[in-house]
Every structure is written in C-alpha cells, then in structure tokens.
Image (cartoon, grey):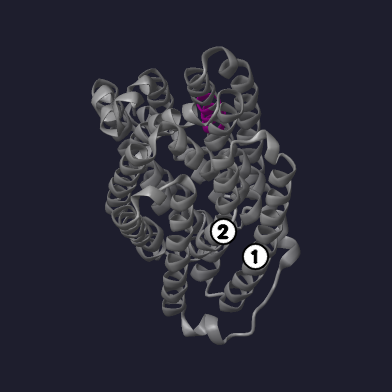
Amino acid sequence: MALKIISLGLGFFINVILARLLGVKDFGAYALSLSWAGLLGVPAVMGLDAFLIRKISIYHTQREWSLIRGALIWANKISWVSSFSLVGLAILGILISRNQMEPAVFETFCIAMFLIPLTTSARIRQAILQGLNKIILGQMPEQIIFPILFIALSSSIWLFSAESFSPQTVMCLRLSAMGITLVFGVFLLRKVLAENVKSVTPEFKITEWFKIAIPMFWMSGANVINSYCDSIMLGAFRGSAEVGLYTVATSGAFLVSLILAGVNISLSPIVAALYSKNNMKKLQEVVDKSARWVFLSGWVVGILVMIFGYWFLLVFGIEFIQAKSALNILVIGNIFMSCMGTVAVVLLMTGKERIAMKGFGAGAALNIVLNALFIPQWGMEGAALATATSITVCYMFLTWVAYRELKIQTLPFLRFSK
C-alpha cells in the first residue's frame, strides 16, 4: 500500500508538470498515445500475467519447480512474439491513416508503440514475483524507480532545452526510463528465483496453460477496454484537447480506487493458495477483511475528492477546471466499484475466469455502446457517464456470480449485518 501511495504521488506530480508544460492540446496528444499503448498491451500480454500469478502461486505451494520454470519460459516466448507483432501492425495501421491525424499525435503514437514490448515484459515479471509472494519486489521497479527516472530525464531536458519539450520528446523519455527500469527488474527476478527453479529441467503443460490463459486474456482485454476506450473514443469524436482534460479527471477518480488496487495485488496469490487447499472458510475471512478496507477507503476518499475537486483540478492549470463534472461522475462510478472490487480477483484466482470473462466482456461492450451514444452529445461528461455505468453493471453481475458459484460474499455490508 505504501508503494501504491508513493507511486500515486509521483504519478500525480508527473501529470501536473506535464500538463502545465505541454498545455491542454499537447498533453492530450501524449495521453491519447499512451492510452493506445495501454490498450494494445492487452493482446500483447495475452492474459499471461493473471495466468502466472495463479499457477506459480499453486506450483510454488506444491513445490513443482520444473513446472514453474516451464511456465516462465513459455510465457516469455509467447509475450515477446505477440508484443513485437503488435508493434508492427500498429505502426502499419497508423501509417495508412497518417493524413487524417495531427502531426504531433502521429509522431507521439509511433514512439508510444515501442512501449508495448517493454510494458509486456514488465507485467510478466511482476506476475512471476507476485505468484512467488514477492509483492514488494515485483512492484517496486515500475512503482518507484520508473517515475523517479522519468522525472529526472524530463527535468534535464526541460532545464537545458525547454524549446524542444514536446509530446514526442516526453514519450521518448518515457520509453528510455521504461527500458532502464526493465533491466533492473530482470536483475531483481534473477536474484529472487530459487536455485531449484534455475537448475531444474523445465516441464511444459502447454494445452492446459492455453485453456487457462485464453479466458484470462479476454477478461483482461475487456477490463482494459473499460479503462481506455473512453479516452480513445473521446479523442476520435472530440480531439486530443478534450482527452487532456479527461485524463486529469481520471487521475483524480483513481484516488478512490487506490486502496482497491493495493489490496487486489496482495490478495491474488493468497486467494489462489487458499482455494487450492479448499480452505473456503479462511478464504471468506480474507475477502471480508479486504472488502471492508476497500469499502471504507473508497467512500471517504470519494467524498473528499468531490468536495475538493475544483482545487485538485486547479493544480494542473486554470483550463483544467472544465473537467469538474467529468471528475464527479467518475468518482461516483469508482465508489460503487470500491464496494465490489475484490470480486474480480476472487473469480480469477479460483478458476472461474470463463464466467468472469463473460461479465467483463458484457461490461466492455456496454461501455463502447454508451460511449458512442453519449460522447457526441455530452463530450467528456458523456465518456465519464458511460464508463461509470458500465463498471457498475459489470461488478454487480460479478458479485452475484461469485456468490452463486463459490458461496463467497464480497459485499462488505452483508457481512457487517451478521
């Protein structure tokens, strides 16, 4: 949780500085390109991150060292092939539609695409360490080292060559910082892996692994569509300037789900291990405690953000206060998600990924439809409303499914009443 809070503070500082130095339009070009890189990163990782958390946690509990090594080798090969293939396809696609784009957006987008293999490798490494219950080591490079490097590189360029500070330059700096962070992360992984894993002959269960990874891929894809399609569709309908405003609003709304993000990272390997032992009573206790923390923090932080939202947006610049309504709508959606947010991890780590996939898929489809209907009429407020509505509907369905399939209650107030 401390890592998440520090990372959030660093990320907030980065966004404030970039928004002020680049201005609404250029910051929007940067944010839009980053959204595309995040969206395309889903098919690149192919659900292997969630797969690795679950299977490595189980293999580690059962001391299946050969299967751990086999899963690592298999996942890394698949992710590198898929990520570089997507980079090529994305750049080819953007070259075809180049004449319809602003030059700054086109150039920034091309640079951002090379983030895909780096972020894919980072997510694979994080998942491995998370499955081994080395959560802090898994998160530290991207949560702490990367933002510090990015700030240092950006500050150097701005101090010595302020006239060249552009979204293209900033994206290049992000790419450089990510590359350095990846090298450090790989070094940490090699240090942590047990000698039993390094020396044993790898064992592969590729058919079984694909059956698990594919539903997780669709589920992760639907989840990320919910995260990025609003910004991407807003850029298509309204242009990069409004994306810049909306990105700041989403950063404020993320404060509501901060505790949820930290809890879910810690909860994943615990749920997988308890379920593999069929210890459902202990699993319910763990879910109860997690849900209560998330529930209380979500409401408290959400109310504070809504009260002080004007001043929060003013930090980014006077022009960003236009995003106040969008911020409030997103905060309300995230408050509802915080009441039910642990359910996604529970389903994913207990072998119910196919059912969860249907819920997230329906939510993503609803999000796209609502964005297409609302954005032309209401702009960023419409995007916020579409996202908040689809998230709420999706998580309500998943909460019902978790109780039906597992008899696990993930709504905290139901347990309070007993």
User: Is residue 409 at all visible to an observer of this figure?
Assistant: no
Q: How many marks?
A: 2
Callout 2: 10 Å neighbours few (<14), some, many (20+)? many
Q: Element at badge 1?
A: helix
Report the front residue among 94 and 215: 94
- Measured as percent of width and height from the top left, residue 413 is found at 36, 27
Marked residue nearer the N-terminal end (1 or 2): 1
Where does residue 241 sit, x and y in percent of width and height? 48, 29
The answer to which image quadrant residue 319 occupies is top left
Q: Which residue is mark 1?
A: 80
Mark 2, residue position? 120
In the displayed image of the protein, which residue is found farthest to the top? 377
Task: Tell me the amino acid under the disc marked 1.
Answer: Trp
Disc 2 is placed on an element classified as helix
Q: Is residue 394 magenta?
A: yes
Q: Quadrant of the C terminus?
A: top left
Question: Gap between marks 1 and 2, in whole Å?
Answer: 8 Å
**Residue type beneath disc 2:** Thr
In this rendering, would 267 be left or right of 113?
Answer: left
- The relative height of residue 31 versus residue 378 in the rendered view (above or below) is below
What residue is drawn where x is 68% and y is 47%? 215
Q: Is residue 282 above or below residue 97?
A: below
Q: Which mark is residue 12?
A: none
| In-front residue for pair 111/258 | 111
Q: Which residues are magenta?
A: 391-400
> Residue 100 or 347: which is nearer the viewer?
100
* x then y, percent, for residue 160: 31, 58
The image quadrant that residue 50 belongs to is bottom right
Magenta segment's dominant SS is: helix
Q: Is the residue under label 2 in contact with that under label 1 (CB below 8 Å)?
A: yes
Q: Is residue 129 magenta?
A: no
